[in-house]
Amino acid sequence: MKCLLVTTHPLTNSLCKHLSSHVADKLQSQGHEVTIEDLYEQNFQPALTADERRSFYDDPYNSSTVSDEVERLLEAELLVLVFPTWWFSFPAMLKGWFDRVWGPGIAYDHASDLGPISPRLKKLKEVVVVTTLGSPWWVDRLVMRQPVKKILKHGLLGACTENCRLQFLSLYESENLNEGKLDAFKTKINKAFQNLKEKSDYDSRSL
């Protein structure tokens, strides 16, 4: 599969950077074609520009300053997002990637009457999220009701893709981490990608 791995963290020695490397190695060992998009390393500018916003209802949307990012997104069959969850939300850098790259005419089409939008990311069939949180699981799930997962599943993938499967892997209490807990999470990651491989093998046999 053509995989786009998008990762974001300002520190080069961060846990997210370590997990991104693990994910890339695992995907490549399974034969996937992996493109890594490190938003901080690429100095991605997350703020939506005035020209971009002004063209949101024009045809076409002005994506000229993010054309490379758009091309990589449109080619992806598998999208992997590795990021820290801060304040129960996306980091600003990743939120800006959604704002600027997942634009009209790229990720979706506006309805002529400005009703519900229609999806355009029809190549994208698998999304895997690997995220770290400082909070315990019960705060995210029981108190906050997993806001990041809801936004991604219903607000983004639900509107911009068709029949796209989401796997969401959360490493809780990541600021109090030991080697055993980290190894267990890596095993969970490996299992998620093994599921992808098995599904891909099954689909290829059914063609």
Image (tube, rainbow, N blue to C red):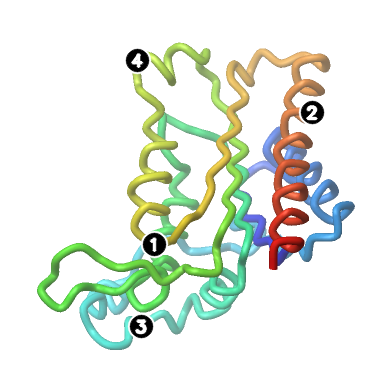
Labels 2 and 1: the sequence-earlier one = 1
Q: Secondary structure at mark 3?
A: loop
Spatial distance from mark 2 to mark 4, Cα to Cα?
27 Å
Q: Amino acid at mark 2?
A: Thr
Point out which mark residue 187 bears: 2
The residue that disc 1 covers is 160
Q: Where does the C terminus fall, quadrant-wise? A: bottom right
Spatial distance from mark 1 to mark 4, Cα to Cα?
28 Å
Q: Residue at x 42, y 45 (%)?
A: 152
Q: Residue at x 35, y 46 (%)?
A: 154
Labels 3 and 1: the sequence-earlier one = 3
Are there few (<14), some (14-19), or many (20+) residues within 10 Å of tag 1?
A: many
The residue that disc 3 covers is 62
Q: Amino acid at mark 3?
A: Asn
Spatial distance from mark 3 to mark 2, Cα to Cα?
42 Å
Labels 2 and 4: the sequence-earlier one = 4
Q: Nearer the viewer, mark 1 or mark 4?
A: 1
Q: Secondary structure at mark 1?
A: helix
Q: Amino acid at mark 4?
A: Val
Picture quadrant of residue 107: bottom left
The residue that disc 4 covers is 143
Furthest residue to the right?
29
Point out which mark residue 137 bears: none
Spatial distance from mark 3 to mark 1, Cα to Cα?
18 Å
Spatial distance from mark 2 to mark 1, Cα to Cα?
30 Å
